[in-house]
Image (tube, grey):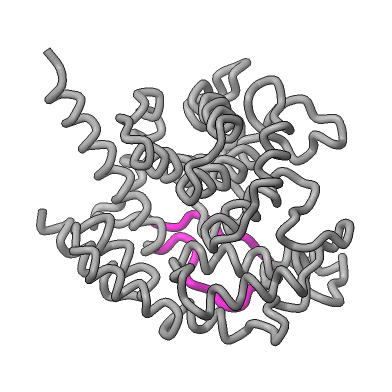
Amino acid sequence: MARSDSVIEWLLDSDPAIRWQVMRDLIDAPEREWMAERAKVETEGWGAKLLSFQDEDGQWAGGAFLPAGFDPHEWREQGQPWTATTFSLSQLREFGLDPSSERARRTVASIGVSARWEEGGQPYWEGEVEECINGRTVADGAYFGIDVSSIVERLAGERLDDGGWNCERARGSVRSSFASTINVLEGLLEFEKSTGGTPRSREARSTGEEFLLQRNLFRRLSTGEPADERFLHFLHPNRWRYDILRALDYFRASALLTGTDPDPRLGEAIGHLRSRRLEDGRWPVDWILPGRVWFHIDEGQGRPSRWITLRAMRVLRWWMRGLQSASDDGP
């Protein structure tokens, strides 16, 4: 208990974007208290800093997916850039910027007017063509109160036969990918939170979840081997990338929305998550994506990470409560 208390104190000694989620998810603070802390995201710390880089037309870095004037050599030599509108908006959602705030409403309205996808010039809130990008666009749009139902309908119709998604589908892929699937699932979940969803969106979310669960969140269905060793190494920010902690946090949020108990097939991933906990009760960030960013928000690769620790602790708390609930309901 003392170890847990010291970790909670460490998490609270942080940015408002971390603190309000600790208050809500780990210490059960009254709603009025964590909502007051959440409101600070707009005016203090990382949230305010990211908003300060916003262009006058509501975008970031002058582009939807890529910064204005982007040179492809940068991607090859330094990594994908993360400063444009789509990644900045997703980060504000992760921080918890209040979608009802005047700044948030003004931002998403301006983006709807100004931003166009580089791929085909489509208006931002009509979506792009890749499922991975559209999943995040749905998540951001639904969170910030935009009608993204047309993108949701498109995504529901783009599922592959195995139940998930792959952004290479248009280029012939017939197998779903873990990364594309988690991006779409997060979008569909946010849409369901905001609107209740539709029969098609709920059914699509169910098949996408089953795709991941059948594979224990990281294994190949054909051989049982890990599909990618990086899925077992924790990353932040994830951007479009997949790891099992991202998936576990998704399943936690999904179960809380639907009132269901944890699926037992999550157990192996939970065991791995526990095994990665440091002796002092914290979790490290294993790797950080290269590429241009506005600023860094973790202490550095290999060091204890507040973001990873927050997500891990709330997943384990939910898992243990689920086991207790199942035990209480047993014979």
Is 288 magenta? The answer is yes
Q: Which residue is drawn at 85% across and 36% down?
A: 170
State whether residue 49 is above or below residue 184: below
Residue 122 image point, x, y percent: 83, 59
The residue shown at (75%, 41%) is: 167
Q: What stretch is highlighted in magenta?
A: 284-303
Q: For this view, does 177 lie left or right of residue 321?
A: right
Q: Name the image quarter holding the C terminus.
A: top left
**Residue 92 at x, y percent in the picture:** 52, 69
Q: Is residue 274 left or right of residue 97?
A: left
Q: Which residue is drawn at 39% across and 44% down?
A: 253
Name the quadrant containing residue 55: bottom right
| Residue 321 left/right relative to 203 | left
Residue at the top extreme, as displayed: 331
Task: Identify the main secondary structure in magenta.
Answer: loop
Q: Is residue 182 something that shows in the picture?
A: yes
Q: Quadrant of residue 27?
A: bottom left
Q: Position of residue 276 (x, y in %)?
A: 36, 45
**Residue appearing at x 77%, y 78% in the figure:** 62
Q: Position of residue 228 (x, y in %)?
A: 60, 36
Viewer-side residue, 123 vs 251:
123
